[in-house]
Amino acid sequence: MLDLSQVALLGLDRTELKSLVESTGEPAYRAKQLLEAIYRQRVESVEQISTLSQDLRGRLAAKGVTVGAPRIEKRFVSQDGTVRYLIACVDGQSVETVWMPEGDGGEAGDGSEAGELAERFEERLSLRTSGIKPRSQQEPIAALKRDAGQRQGQRQRLNQRPQGQNQGRSTICISSQVGCAVDCQFCLTALLGVKRNLTAGEIVGQVCAVLKEQKVSPPENRINLVFMGMGEPFLNYENFVKAARLLVEEVGIAERRMTVSTAGIVPRIHDFAKEKIRPKLAISLNAPNDELRTRIMPLNKKWNLEMLMAAARAYPLRTREWITFEYVLLGGVNDAPENAKEVSELLRGMRCKVNLIALNPGPGVEFTTPGMERVTEFQAILREAGIPAFVRRPRGRDIYAACGQLKRTVEIATAQER
């Protein structure tokens, strides 16, 4: 007999909810009502599920069944509109989730220039290999910039929509662990260590909480999702995969608008390649050789670049899909022209793009942010080698919401709490 006193509805899939309602003597269609209430209406308590009879709601509540909806504990609002949420878990732990109203400036499919350029770049490569003459004979990057510019008017019209409708480029960055087990030397989150894995319900719950807070709802509103918050998703693999499935099938976020980032858990890259529902893959590269990568990412001792690149090259890409390599530029460490040339050789022949991220600084991180001219030179070398490379725009630096800055810190003088 199912112990309902331990059940939180958020995180359960269709099969599990059907089993739950049948254990109460209710017909199977109640499972569909629960799915709609939890993932689309985003109710916070069993009593709010109006499609259930009052008697059933009372029985479920009396048995201790809860929705398990997370609670937004604090909000920090950046000058650029980014919001960093501190979300409380039932055991007193908390995680951070970030809302970026104009995307993160680097993920293909998020409506940003970088995403559009990458997609158009792939189109042109496909035409070239198929023997079809492309529409323009210009140098590829220049032509792509022109094409992206033609869409500027459409983006401007989107930006003029009232609040609640202007969500064409919004991105939610979610966490998969409380803290992080991967000791990247340039990341604030790594200073926390890892407390525990999040459940599938806690992962999905972050998204539901932010959607409700922002008064948006996919698929009506085009929302992009990145598993790039606190934690390493592939070290919480089963819960991450289940959460991704629920987010696609029940919350309504398109699979092609979801990206998961891994520091390079090689066995799980192979596992992920076999998943039926599979967000796009991003790999944190950050160095072009083993000596340097091991210095800043100790994980490289276990899965070195040879193993990582073999897994990436074997990864089966779908139509119009690319692997993204993320590269955090650390001043005077991995940002030299020689490093860029090494990266070009490492990635030669792959269907990939590179997101360049100038280090987002923070207390306890000893590295420095390189100058913009250094970043631009690095990007130019990659592009000259035929690798699409884009500089990710920092979002929410003033509230410690940017890449590598997430840490459970609530006393931030620059934050505007509301």
Image (cartoon, rainbow, N blue to C red):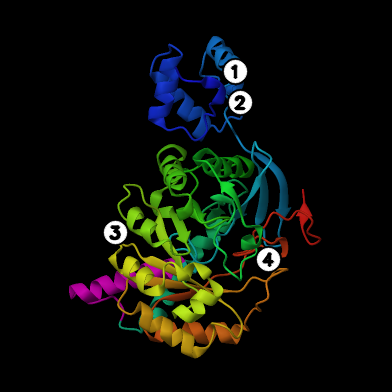
Task: Rate crowding at label 2 as few (under 14), some (14 to 19) or many (20 or more) other CA atoms within 10 Å.
Answer: some
Mark-to-mark CA distance, 1 and 4: 42 Å
Q: Mark 1 or 4, which is nearer the eye?
A: 1
Does 88 appear in magenta? no
* Residue 386 seen by the camera: no
Q: Which mark sits nearer the N-terminus, 4 or 3?
A: 3
Disc 3, SS: loop
Residue 364 rendering spot, x and y as whole percentages: 71, 69
Q: Which mark sits nearer the N-terminus, 2 or 1?
A: 2
Q: Which mark sits nearer the N-terminus, 4 or 2?
A: 2
Question: Are the two marked residues, 3 and 2, in contact with CB atoms closer than 8 angstroms?
Answer: no
Q: Magenta residues, as a range?
A: 115-136
Query: Which residue is nearer to you in this view: 235 or 166?
Result: 235
> Residue pushed farthest left?
131
Q: Which mark is residue 19?
A: none
Task: Rate crowding at label 4 as few (under 14), some (14 to 19) or many (20 or more) other CA atoms within 10 Å.
Answer: some
Q: Which mark is residue 318?
A: 3
Type of residue at label 3? Arg
Q: Mark 2 or 1, which is nearer the eye?
A: 1
Q: Which mark is residue 45?
A: 2
Q: Which mark sits nearer the N-terminus, 3 or 2?
A: 2
Total marks in image: 4
Mark-to-mark CA distance, 1 and 3: 45 Å
